[in-house]
């Protein structure tokens, strides 16, 4: 019989299995600042829907100022913390509202700050997944389309399938903000599993 000894193959397979089961972190933000935001609600339900070994870490964007090149260096502390959270994470999840058929200004502002400085951007080569809630009937599909060129220019790699577009958001959560819609739960599970697998592929594991 030819080939490597059984023990070597077992060790290789154990190493592969350890890599596949290694803990992953998905940094996430919701592009809405209002207290009762459905996008924030979706984010806060994500951890419970993530696969084993995957943690969803919310980035606090509440104190990030409007982008202004005059205050870029040194960056405001909330910006530095946001960049560090994205840099340290294996993937980024953006949960954005749709405003006037595009992403919210809050979402764009976070991306603009994160993309600087361009030669050391925390977004470069980052795996990114997308979800969003709207009060209308089309979810946030048009906001996603508006984000695609932004991903190209900033060097992010978007998981194009699945994306989660939640329409008529008020009907999907209970009064305490718990996601109650089984289809949206299944869609979010699929997105988080897909994003974790995508991040592992990008890391070469
Ligand atoms: C300025 C503005 C523009 C909006 N434009 C859209 C839109 O283009 N499409 C849509 O489905 N909903 C639109 N909406 C409604 C949002 O979907 C709704 O306010 C949603 O709840 C915002 O997300 P949030 O709950 O996380 O704050 C808009 C709301 C605002 C305030």
Image (cartoon, helix red, strand yellow):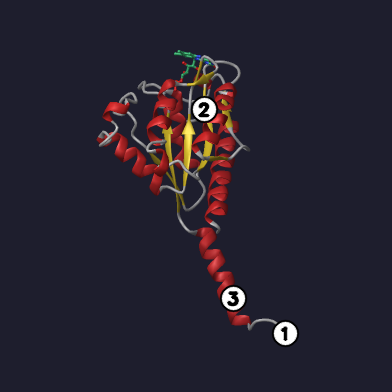
Q: Which mark is residue 10?
A: 3
Q: Is residue 169 above or below residue 57?
A: above
Q: Mark 3, residues whose alpha carbon is within 10 Å: few (<14), some, or many (≥20)?
A: few
Mark 1 or 3: in front is 1
3D distance between C-alphas at marks 2 and 1: 54 Å
Residue 94 % position (x, y): 47, 33
Contact check, label 2 and label 1, Cβ < 8 Å: no
3D distance between C-alphas at marks 2 and 3: 43 Å
Residue at x-position 46% and y-position 21%: 104
- Which element carries disc 3, helix, strand or loop? helix
Q: Which mark is residue 2?
A: 1
Residue at x-position 65% and y-position 81%: 4
Residue at x-position 52% and y-position 40%: 156
- Which element carries disc 1, helix, strand or loop? loop
Q: State the residue position of label 2.
A: 132
Residue 33 % position (x, y): 36, 23
169 lies left or right of 81: right
Residue at x-position 49% and y-position 36%: 154
> Mark 2 or mark 1: which comes first in sequence?
1
Quarter in which the C terminus is drawn: bottom right
Q: Which mark is residue 186?
A: none
> Mark 2 or mark 3: which comes first in sequence?
3
Residue 71 % position (x, y): 27, 29
3D distance between C-alphas at marks 1 and 3: 16 Å
Name the quadrant containing residue 123: top left
Residue 115 is at least partly visible in this image: yes
Residue at mark 2: C-beta within 8 A of ligand 1:
no
């Amino acid at each position: 019989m030819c080939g490597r000894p059984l023990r070597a193959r077992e060790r290789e397979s154990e190493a592969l299995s350890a890599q596949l089961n290694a803990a992953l972190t998905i940094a996430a933000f919701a592009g809405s600042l209002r207290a009762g935001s459905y996008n924030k609600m979706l984010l806060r339900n994500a951890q419970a829907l993530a696969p084993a070994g995957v943690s969803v870490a919310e980035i606090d964007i509440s104190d990030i100022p409007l982008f202004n090149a005059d205050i870029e260096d040194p960056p405001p502390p909330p910006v530095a913390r946001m960049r560090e959270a994205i840099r340290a994470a294996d993937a980024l999840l953006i949960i954005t509202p749709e405003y006037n058929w595009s992403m919210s200004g809050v979402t764009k502002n976070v991306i603009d700050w994160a993309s600087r400085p361009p030669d050391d951007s925390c977004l470069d080569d980052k795996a990114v997944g997308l979800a969003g809630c709207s009060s209308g009937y089309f979810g946030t599909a048009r906001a996603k389309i508006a984000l695609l060129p932004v991903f190209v220019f900033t060097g992010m790699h978007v998981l194009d399938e699945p994306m989660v577009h939640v329409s008529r958001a008020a009907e999907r959560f209970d009064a305490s903000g718990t996601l109650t819609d089984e289809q949206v739960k299944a869609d979010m599970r699929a997105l988080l599993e897909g994003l974790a697998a995508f991040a592992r592929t990008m890391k070469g594991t």
